[in-house]
Amino acid sequence: MRRYLVAGNWKMNLGPAAGLELAAGVAARLRGRVLRGDALVCPPYVTIPAVAAAADGNPLLLGAQNCGDQDGGAFTGEVSPAMLKEAGVQYVIIAHSERRQYQREDDDLFVRKINLLHACGLKAIFCYGELLGERKAGREREIVNAQLEGVLPRLQYVDPYNTVLAYEPVWAIGTGETASPAQAQEMHAWSRQVVARLLGESPASHMRILYGGSCKASNAHELFSQPDVDGGLIGGASLKVDDFVGIIDGAEAALG
Ligand code: PGA
């Protein structure tokens, strides 16, 4: 009943020329196929206009990795949700662990960004997940609960169609180490329980929860076959046509 989402987070990789080449390659492989879920690429800001022609929703969708927390004005270096929307963006990644860590972004900022992008009609992909030390200390459920509780109840317009969750255990991001399908399922089921408590049973059962952290074509099918895993947020493996399309195929087979 939930459509899968496979989202490529290109991070700080690929300028306009290389980005267009990758997106056009993925789009060419998907063209003419009726996907049973959604496939999305999230390039760096400057690459978005070049990629927009290829990620035109037919069927490949366009996203961004971040947005500003204001409508506009004197905020040097920021890009507003409305500008992203004008450029063809439909989804924005918020609260990625790299932004939590390197930019010291916090819950108040995530709430402002998500409220603003929702008000523009954009969809949020809200990331959360525990650090290695927190898992080793057996605190992963507590951390996930706190990260969801710090943001979800404060969102003005949240619904299961404008908000996607992405559980990304930080110890699995870019490390080659993947959560086992059983570990992913356990944390996704827990997340859904937390969402049910915060937002209600019906939103929780309809909201998509993606897995992120060293997801690749070889493990996508098994991860996405878990009942509470509704697709993936893909870093490294979204940078090559074959790898990314292989993950979309894994989702089609598991979740279609
Ligand atoms: P990875 O990154 O697939 O390279 O581990 C995932 C992410 O950070 O979204």
Image (cartoon, grey):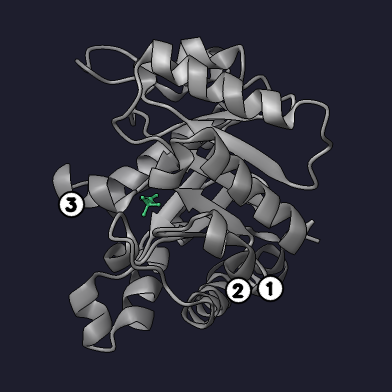
Q: Are marks 2 and 3 in contact (CB under 8 Å)?
A: no
**Left or right: 51 in relation to 4:** left
For the image shown, how many numbered marks are present on the structure?
3
Q: Residue at x 60, y 73 (%)?
A: 196
Q: Are marks 1 and 2 in contact (CB under 8 Å)?
A: yes
Q: Earlier in the sequence, mark 2 or mark 3?
A: 3
Distance of mark 1 from mark 3, alpha carbons? 32 Å
Quadrant location of residue 112?
A: top left
* Nearer to the camera, 23 or 109: 23
Q: Earlier in the sequence, mark 1 or mark 2?
A: 2
* Nearer to the camera, 8 or 106: 8
Query: Could you say whether the residue bearing mark 1 is in a helix, strand or loop?
Result: helix
The amino acid marked with disc number 2 is Ala
Distance of mark 1 from mark 2, alpha carbons? 5 Å
Q: Is residue 174 above or below residue 242?
A: below
Q: Are marks 1 and 3 in contact (CB under 8 Å)?
A: no
| Residue matched to label 3 | 101
Quadrant occupied by the C terminus = bottom right
* Nearer to the camera, 246 or 121: 246
* Nearer to the camera, 149 or 163: 163
Quadrant location of residue 79?
A: top left
| Residue matched to label 1 | 201
Q: Is residue 252 above or below residue 21?
A: below
Q: Residue at x 57, y 49 (%)?
A: 163
The location of residue 200, given as percent across then percent down, is 64, 70
Query: Could you say whether the residue bearing mark 2 is in a helix, strand or loop?
Result: helix
The amino acid marked with disc number 3 is Gln
